[in-house]
Image: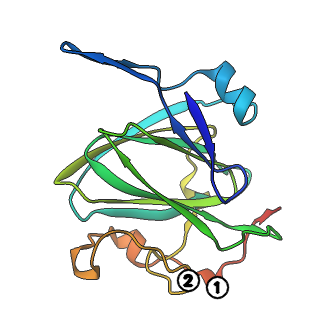
Amino acid sequence: MKYIKTEIQDVFIIEPSVFGDERGYFLESFNLQQFEKHIYPIKFIQDNESKSSKGVLRGLHFQKPPYNQAKLVRCVQGVVIDVAVDVRKGSPTYGKHVAVELSGENKRQLFVPRGFAHGFSVLSETAIFAYKVDNTYAPEYDYGILWNDKDLNIDWGLSEDEVKLSEKDKNLTLFSDLVSPFNF
């Protein structure tokens, strides 16, 4: 497995070693010992999976402390643009983001640490998206930033009229109005 640093500290792209032949393929999607060696100690407690159609955009979400979460995300089938936005007040990369194409083909993963808003957009007809989290879901601590915030300038790979949002995601906060609960 390769652990690739991004331009934002603690956000990593992880590329698994894939072993394939005419029968199919095998890969190790997670190895705690290797993860902790290259990133830091973590205790993932839950795996989640979603299926979405083309144009669906989920995000940008995070949970406030004490229910903040780190995530290890991947696209099992299809193609997505996955985004992590630094919302750690005082961070030299506050308001900056990493955007990575994740797909069933490239099998890349993105590690999104605590203190980051996260979202993804679906570029293929459908996508199956899977992720691990290190803390429980607490709806009353759920928060987010509007996906098309001009201050963030994120390229989601979709035109605005292609984007399909939940009612919740249509009404998220502007980045400039964010009172970050995270310190760097």
Q: Position of residue 116 (x, y in %)?
A: 64, 59
Q: Toward which corner of the image does residue 22 lie, by quadrant? A: top left
Amino acid carrying label 1: it is Asp
Amino acid at pointer 2? Leu
Q: Which residue ends up furthest to the front in the rendered image?
A: 21
State yes or no: discs 2 and 1 in contact (Cβ < 8 Å): yes
Residue located beneath label 1 in the image: 177
- Label 2: element kind: loop
Toward the viewer: 129 or 2?
2
Label 2 to label 1: alpha-carbon separation:
5 Å
- Residue 78 in the figure: left or right of residue 136: left
Residue at the spot 54% in from the left edge and 55% down from the top edge: 139
33 to the left or right of 171: right
Indicate the quadrant containing the N terminus: top left, top right, bottom left or bottom right: top right
Q: Residue at the spot x=19%, y=12% of the render?
A: 23
Q: Position of residue 39 (x, y in %)?
A: 71, 36
Label 2 Cα crowd, 10 Å radius (few <14 / some 14-19 / many 20+):
some
- Which residue is found at the position 36% from the left and 40% from the top? 106
In this rendering, is residue 12 above or below 167?
above
> Residue 168, position in %: x, y?
41, 70
- Identify the colour scheme used: rainbow
Q: Position of residue 35 (x, y in %)?
A: 65, 28
Point out which mark residue 174 bears.
Answer: 2
Quarter that holds the C terminus: bottom right
Q: Nearer the viewer, residue 141 or 148?
A: 148
Q: Secondary structure at mark 1?
A: helix
Above or below for 170 versus 2:
below
